[in-house]
Amino acid sequence: MHAIFKTGGKQYRVAPGDTVRVERLPHEAGTAVEFPQVLAVFGDDGAVLTQPELSSAKVVGTITDNDRAKKIVVFKFKRKKQYRRTIGHRQNYSEIKVDSIVV
């Protein structure tokens, strides 16, 4: 069984036992979290649950880590104009271990 849920403006496909990185959540590591915005649930037999059945569905998980991703270097360059800019960015994330999908 796996599900598609939405958090932080993005959609993630998960199954119980998976680990997924989502946008930073305002909770400490070790905290249980629920994601009520489930878009679809796929059963082991291939059946798909959609909107009417999904009103009570949720993805339950535990935050295992709050950290920052590796640095991404953004380099801007315009030839013949002596223009160069180097900018770095590190995205904050929360790592979630999916415990169960409740339907």
Image (tube, helix red, strand yellow):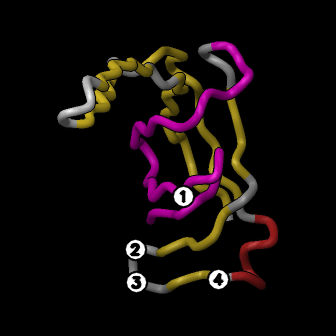
Q: Quadrant of the N terminus?
A: bottom left
Q: In the rendered structure, which amino acid carries the disc numbered 3? A: Gly
User: Which image quadrant for residue 58?
Assistant: bottom right
- Measure how far apart labels 4 and 2 are at the Cα level: 15 Å
The residue tagged 1 is: 11
Determine the secondary structure under disc 3.
loop
Specify whether residue 19 is painted magenta: yes
Q: Nearer the viewer, mark 4 or mark 3?
A: 4
How many labels were placed on the picture? 4
- Measure how far apart labels 2 and 1 are at the Cα level: 21 Å
Magenta segment: 1-28
The structure residue drawn at horizontal position 63% and vertical position 70%, both measured from the top left corner, is 39
Mark earlier in primary sequence (3, 1):
1
Residue placed most toward the observer, 8 or 33: 8
Outermost residue toward the left in this view: 80
- Measure how far apart labels 4 and 3 are at the Cα level: 13 Å
The residue tagged 2 is: 44
Q: Is 40 placed above or below 67 here?
A: below
- Marks 3 & 2, CB-CB < 8 Å contact: yes
User: Which image quadrant for residue 79?
Assistant: top left
- Measure how far apart labels 3 and 2 are at the Cα level: 5 Å
The residue tagged 3 is: 46
